[in-house]
Image (cartoon, coloured by chain):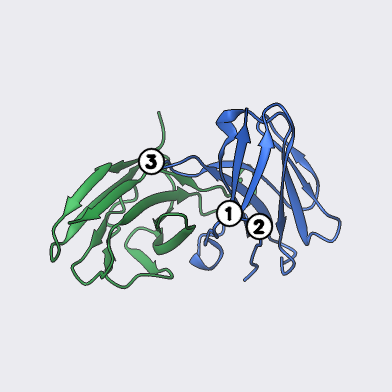
Chain colours: A green, B blue
Amino acid sequence: DGGITQSPKYLFRKEGQNVTLSCEQNLNHDAMYWYRQDPGQGLRLIYYSQIVNDFQKGDIAEGYSVSREKKESFPLTVTSAQKNPTAFYLCASSIAATGGLNTGELFFGEGSRLTVL
Amino acid sequence: DAKTTQPPSMDCAEGRAANLPCNHSTISGNEYVYWYRQIHSQGPQYIIHGLKNNETNEMASLIITEDRKSSTLILPHATLRDTAVYYCIVRVAGETSGSRLTFGEGTQLTVNP
């Protein structure tokens, strides 16, 4: 089935360690996104990529890094510079083109919950 | 950027209609209203979207006021499984730049038996 796969679902990290969250999609979408969600709050945009080999910072990019070497993959690295990394991380994708049958909707993965010990 | 305002929480009795409001008074002419919902600890799920006409699908109905400054998502017969956080966002269809992709805190809908 087509969709977005995030892994791992749960991850524990010690302070000072970098960790990489995986996001893979087989929807042939051009655009991919990473969001962070803290308890009781909405989704804040970390990074987004509209095309392979290109990405832009979102609202809270500090302490995070991404790469987009392949269309289907958009991994997120949470670096030791991120002061409060414990959160729920969501990856999403969408079609870039407008018009026709494109609804413009975002397709989300099931999320990765990172806990820093 | 068009911002949205939603009540933080609402309750609804099972089997009754749930009407969730959203204000978007600064919406631009080419921006659509999208609704998503997020069940606890899962990824958000697309529900419906519209530009200026009312829309209906198998999940819900979307009513947009004539001036497009507000909208209402209607779940006609709410069930316990509809308990979730509902997000209203506005963006151009197919927009992939970050300025239109922020989700606010949404409305926590609780459906009671």
In the rendered structure, which amino acid carries the disc numbered 1?
A: Gly
**Where does residue B49 sit, x and y in percent of width and height?**
67, 46
Left or right: residue A48 versus residue B92 is left
> What residue is shown with label 1?
B106
Tell which tag, 2 or 3, sits nearer the viewer.
2
Mark 1 vs mark 2: tell me if same chain: yes
Q: Residue furthest right?
A: B66
Q: Quadrant of residue A67?
A: bottom left
Residue B62 falls in image quadrant: top right
Task: Please state which amino acid type lies under the numbered disc 2.
Answer: Gln
Question: What residue is shown at x 67% (from left), y 31% (from top)?
Answer: B78
**Label pair 1/2, CB-CB below 8 angstroms:** yes
Residue displayed at 39% across by 61% down: A49
* Circle 1: element type: loop
Residue A102: percent from left, percent from top = 60, 45
Coordinates of residue A9 in the picture (x, y in percent): 28, 41
Residue B40 location, quadrant: top left
Q: Residues within 10 Å of mark 3 (few under 14, many from 20)?
A: some
Where is mark 3, residue-wise? A110
The numbered dot on residue B6 is 2
Identity of the residue furthest to the front in this view: B113
| A107, above or below B100, in the image | above
Across and down, in percent, residue B76 comes to 74, 32
Give the answer, above or below, for where A6 lies relative to A53.
above
Callout 3 amino acid:
Glu
